[in-house]
């Protein structure tokens, strides 16, 4: 009996061992199968990538042709004012003296007596006159002459003398040098007549220390250098 029990025990142990190996192989196969299927499913799944796409429209814009150039300006027309600006300075500086020496028959330097008369008329319209020696006289609203000369020490200051001999001055702040030999400059500065409201009478101290109006004759005024004297 003891030998039979041992045989049965060995048989059961052998059977159990065989069964364990079968289960182990089955489990291994099942695990391999599942793993294989899992790998197949992973490798078979396509990888999706999101790629940003942009669309470029090459639609050339239609550029209109450039506009035609503007027509050329009309040629300048000769006017009495242009004659004054072109020839006034020459008449004052040279031609006037030449005309005086020649007896008034010709103004010299290519300007005849008729053109000289036209220039003088333009000066009257602009409110000033110019003598043969080049001195400038402004005309007041009443038509009275006021002679001009520059202040030699104060830039932008013009001295004036009226018909009664009283001396005035006016200062133009934005101009340092004034050329009274140029008719255009005289016209630009004094042509509107506003100077008559801006002129200030020149005064000086007398022997008693009081202020009096300065009065000079024509020669003394032309010798006057500055209001600072």
Image: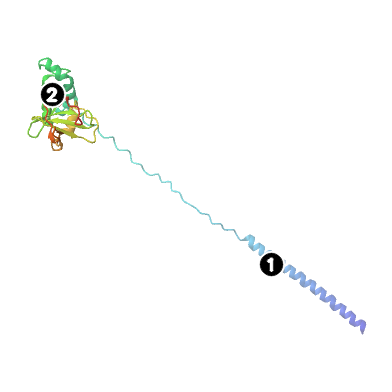
Quarter of the image with the N terminus in it: bottom right
Considering depth in this image, is 109 or 209 the residue closer to the camera? 209
- Residue 151 is labelled as none
Of the numbered discs in the image, which one, if any, rests on residue 219?
Answer: 2
Q: Is residue 114 left or right of residue 150?
A: left
Image spot of residue 139 (x, y percent): 10, 31
Question: Measured along the vertical axis of the image, is residue 71 above or below residue 12?
Answer: above
**Discs 2, 1 touching: Cβ within 8 Å:** no
* Residue at position x 91%, y 82% in the image: 4
Q: Quadrant of the C terminus?
A: top left
In the displayed structure, 32 sits above or below 112; it is below
**Residue 12 shows up from this direction:** yes
Left or right, residue 16 beside residue 61: right
Disc 2 element? helix
Rounded to the nearest angstrom, the CA distance separating label 2 from label 1 is 132 Å
What is the x, y in percent for residue 22?
78, 72
Label 2 packing within 10 angstroms: few (<14), some (14-19), many (20+): few
On the image, numbered disc 1 is attached to which residue?
34
Q: Residue furthest front?
A: 208
Quarter of the rendering containing residue 119: top left
| Residue ranking furthest to the top | 102
Choose top left, top right, bottom left or bottom right for residue 131.
top left
């Amino acid at each position: 009996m003891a030998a039979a029990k041992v045989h049965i025990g060995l048989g059961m142990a052998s059977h159990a061992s065989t069964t364990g190996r079968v289960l182990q192989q089955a489990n291994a196969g099942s695990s391999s199968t599942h793993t294989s299927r899992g790998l197949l499913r992973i490798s078979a799944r396509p990888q999706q990538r999101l790629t940003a796409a942009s669309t470029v429209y090459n639609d050339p814009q239609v550029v209109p042709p450039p506009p035609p150039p503007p027509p050329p300006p009309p040629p300048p027309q000769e006017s009495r004012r242009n004659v004054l600006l072109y020839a006034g300075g020459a008449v004052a500086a040279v031609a006037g003296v030449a005309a005086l020496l020649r007896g008034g028959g010709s103004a010299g330097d290519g300007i005849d007596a008729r053109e000289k008369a036209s220039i003088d008329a333009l000066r009257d319209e602009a409110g000033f006159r110019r003598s043969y020696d080049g001195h400038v006289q402004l005309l007041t609203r009443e038509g009275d002459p006021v002679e001009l000369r520059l202040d030699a020490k104060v830039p932008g200051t013009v001295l004036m003398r009226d018909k009664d001999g009283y001396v005035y001055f006016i200062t133009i702040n934005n101009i340092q040098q004034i050329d009274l030999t140029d008719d255009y400059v005289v016209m630009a500065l004094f042509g509107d007549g506003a100077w008559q409201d801006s002129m200030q009478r020149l005064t000086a101290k007398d022997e008693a220390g009081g202020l009096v109006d300065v009065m000079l004759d024509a020669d003394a005024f032309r010798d006057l250098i500055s209001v600072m004297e």
